Amino acid sequence: MNRSDQTAIVTGAAGFVGSHLCDSLLKMGYTVYGIDNFITGQAKNIDHLESNGNFHFIKADVSQPAAKYLPAGLSPDVVFHLASPASPPRYQAHPVETYLVNSIGTHYLLQHLKEHAPQARFVFASTSETYGDPAEHPQVEGYWGNVNPNGVRSCYDEAKRLGETICGVHARDFGMDVRIVRIFNTYGPRMDLADGRIIPNFIRQAMDSEPLTIYGDGSQTRSFCYVSDLVAGIVLMGTLEDLAGETINLGNPNEEHTALATAELVKKAFDKPELEIIFKDLPGDDPTRRKPDISKARQVLGWSPQVSFAEGLRRVRESLN
Ligand code: NAD
Ligand code: UDP
């Protein structure tokens, strides 16, 4: 559907996922206001949008009241709130910024919309980390999680949980059209290869012909979703009718791999079978396993991931050439 009469706001627009989301929305015809303060994002992710007349970039901190950075009179149809450091090393390096943008940043945006665009849809980028180290597997949306409230990951996972609380209050108590996506591990072109996550680390190590670093014994699992699949789900969440108050998992349950298997798959995809694997300490509160149950996304959004891990890694490799 052509959305040339519609306006979207994307916070975290210069990030990995946010920049792909901006591309998709612009292709659909949206006028897009992208907001970012570059705390973990990169200008090069949105450089190609500079000459696009439908893209407006605002450098701002989304933890500030929205009236400070949004143009007066701007009344968006949909807001995607993605701004937040996302990799464990990065959010642990910026704990205050991380809990602020997910909590008070979410609060300020929703309060602003309540006053200036109460009909707007609001999509909050939450995370599989709200399930913590899950006692249930795979994780369904109804699972409340197993989270350490004062651990090294809490600046992120508890802040996302508070962000969800703030979304719930605005949906229930103020009748706003708020939706939550719980995003599971995603990879693809424009990942920051220095951000310390498992796929960026392994790819950088493979490209530099260095040993691949496994934390712990490598038996922990993650389920890897390719970025175009994720973005398709986020777009559906922001565009379909009648989803106010809904929370939906987005991830790829077909590609649950141990850290050790992930290393082997990256070595294969980058033609580096000879690389050594070395073991390092497991970081604190590292979840032992993670896989989304996406029954709800299949049913409500008609969404399921299409890109296999092998194909996704091939596309990442191609993008780095
Ligand atoms: P990213 O770090 O590449 O992008 C986040 C962007 O938000 C960056 O450009 C950063 O500069 C910006 N940002 C952070 N704080 C800000 C602030 N206060 N004001 C303005 N901009 C700010 O991370 P990503 O992987 O693209 O993640 C995007 C969103 O998806 C995040 O909310 C993250 O928590 C969520 N998520 C991602 C994954 C994943 O695997 N990539 C998994 C679960 C959830
Ligand atoms: N990991 C690893 N080697 C690395 C980076 C990460 O073994 O070089 C592990 C990490 O301990 C975790 C998993 O890979 O168990 C996924 O880590 P990531 O930082 O990508 O994201 P998380 O899902 O933990 O937020």
Image (cartoon, rainbow, N blue to C red):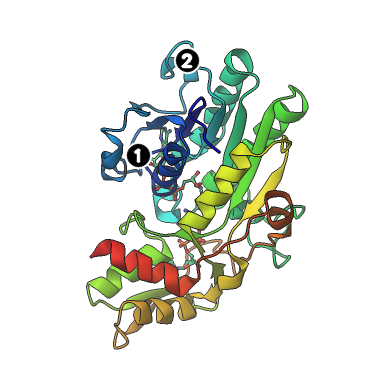
**Looking at the image, can residue 152 be seen?**
no
- The residue shown at (64%, 19%) is 118
Q: Is residue 1 visible?
A: yes
> Along the line of sight, which residue is nearer the eye, 96 or 194?
194
Q: Quadrant of the C terminus?
A: bottom left
**x, y percentage for residue 127?**
58, 50
Which residue type carries mark 2? Ala
- How packed mark 1 is, by other alpha carbons closer than 10 Å (few <14, some 14-19, many 20 or more), is some
Determine whether the residue tagged by mark 1 lies in a helix, strand or loop.
Answer: loop
Residue 297 position (above or below residue 155): below
Instruction: Judge left or right: residue 234 versus residue 131.
Output: left
Q: Is mark 2 within 8 Å of ligand 1?
A: no
Mark 2–mark 1 Cα distance, whole angstroms, equals 21 Å
For disc 2, the marked residue is 67
Figure quadrant of residue 48: top left
| In the depicted structure, whether residue 174 falls above or below residue 270 | above
| Residue 25: image location, x then y, percent | 47, 39
Residue 151, position as x, y percentages in the image: 56, 52
SS category of the residue bearing label 2: helix
Q: Quadrant of ligand 1?
A: top left
Name the quadrant containing residue 305. Answer: bottom right
Can you tell me whether the CB of the residue at mark 1 lies under 8 Å from the nearest atom of ligand 1?
yes
- Point out the frontmost of discs 2 and 1: 2
Q: Residue at x 50, y 66 (%)?
A: 307
* Residue 39 tag number: 1
Which amino acid type corresponds to the residue marked 1 in the rendered image?
Ile
Q: Residue 43, position in %: x, y?
A: 27, 40
Label 2 packing within 10 angstroms: few (<14), some (14-19), many (20+): some
